[in-house]
Image (cartoon, rainbow, N blue to C red):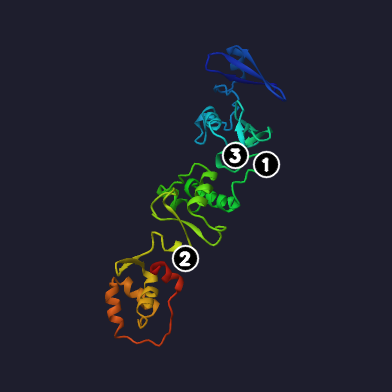
Amino acid sequence: MKKFSYWTHGDGHYYRVRKRPASFQYQRCNRATYRHRQRPIQPLKMPYSGPFKSGPEHPRWVNRDALLIELKSRIYGSWVVIGTEIVTVGRSRKVLCRCYKTGQEHLVNVDNLLAGKTKGPRGVKHQISKNSKVLGERYDAMMQRCKNPRDRNYPNYGGRGIEVRFESRPEFILWMEENLPHENYRGVEIDRTDNNGHYEPGNLRLVTPRENLCNTRRNRHVIYRGQSVLQTHFWHVVKHDIPNFSYSREWTTKLLAMDLSPDEVIRRSRNWQTKVIEFPSPEIVRIYRE
């Protein structure tokens, strides 16, 4: 077993490294001893203690000093950051925090603090409201769609420049309960009024899943009586307004796809008789007539 490995350093000196189980011992040696080993000259690599071996050159490297200053400038639930450095435990970044309610001190995951997933130690009541769980899950889903390139929906949201403009989970939850109240937020979806806008105050509304499907980029609309109506919904609205409208849903949608105007479709239907009895959907009619 070789006891020494020989390296060179940028200062012009040569070193031999004595291998030990727990550490390395660097000893200076002369050039003749180094050349006798006939090892290629390569720079001495000093151990790096950061989360990535490549250090600041890694694309995901974060300046921990600046991050610590940011963490200390805010309060996360009942957690107050008191640590002097961010440490790596396993594969997680953690920082020392103190609960201002109980005085407990713990190492808390930095990513959980930033994402708003931790608000205090166990046993401390820090729930914002009874809807914190369901609204928190909606907030996490929004963040994934807008900020995680590996999410399957990222090209339609973050890839288009859509952003979540709420600072944290609690801010989003409190804003939703104040401006868009609902009993339990089950059976409804959070939709952006402007499909090209951001998740921000003033651009959100509660809709049913069917209504949410009406607000996508791939949908085509027609103007009927001064109102923009989805092509697939046009038949239901016309059937509600004109009960003796004789065209079927499929044929009406096909005629609109052929660039016929709504008035032309209605005019042609007067000369057509059908034996199929169909009724418009009250849920779709409610979107345009209430």
The local secondary structure at tag 3 comes to loop
The amino acid type of the residue labelled 1 equals: Val
Between discs 2 and 3, the one toward the N terminus: 3
Q: Amino acid at mark 3?
A: Gly
Q: Secondary structure at mark 1?
A: loop
**Location of residue 216 by image quarter:** bottom left
Labels 2 & 3 near each other (Cβ < 8 A): no
Measured along the vertical axis of the image, is residue 31 above or below residue 101?
above
- Gap in Å between the C-alphas at discs 1 and 2? 40 Å
Instruction: Identify the residue under disc 3.
Output: 77
Neighbour tally class for label 2: few under 14, some 14-19, many 20 plus, Cα within 10 Å: few
Quick one: quadrant of the N terminus? top right
Q: Please name the residue that numbered disc 1 is placed on.
A: 124
Image point (55%, 44%), residue name = 170
Q: Label 3: how many residues lie within 10 Å, few (<14), some (14-19) or many (20+)?
A: some
149 shown above or below 27: below
> Which quarter of the picture shows residue 234?
bottom left
Q: Nearer the viewer, mark 2 or mark 3?
A: 3
Q: CA distance from mark 2 to mark 3?
A: 36 Å
Location of residue 277 with respect to 100 vertically, above or below = below
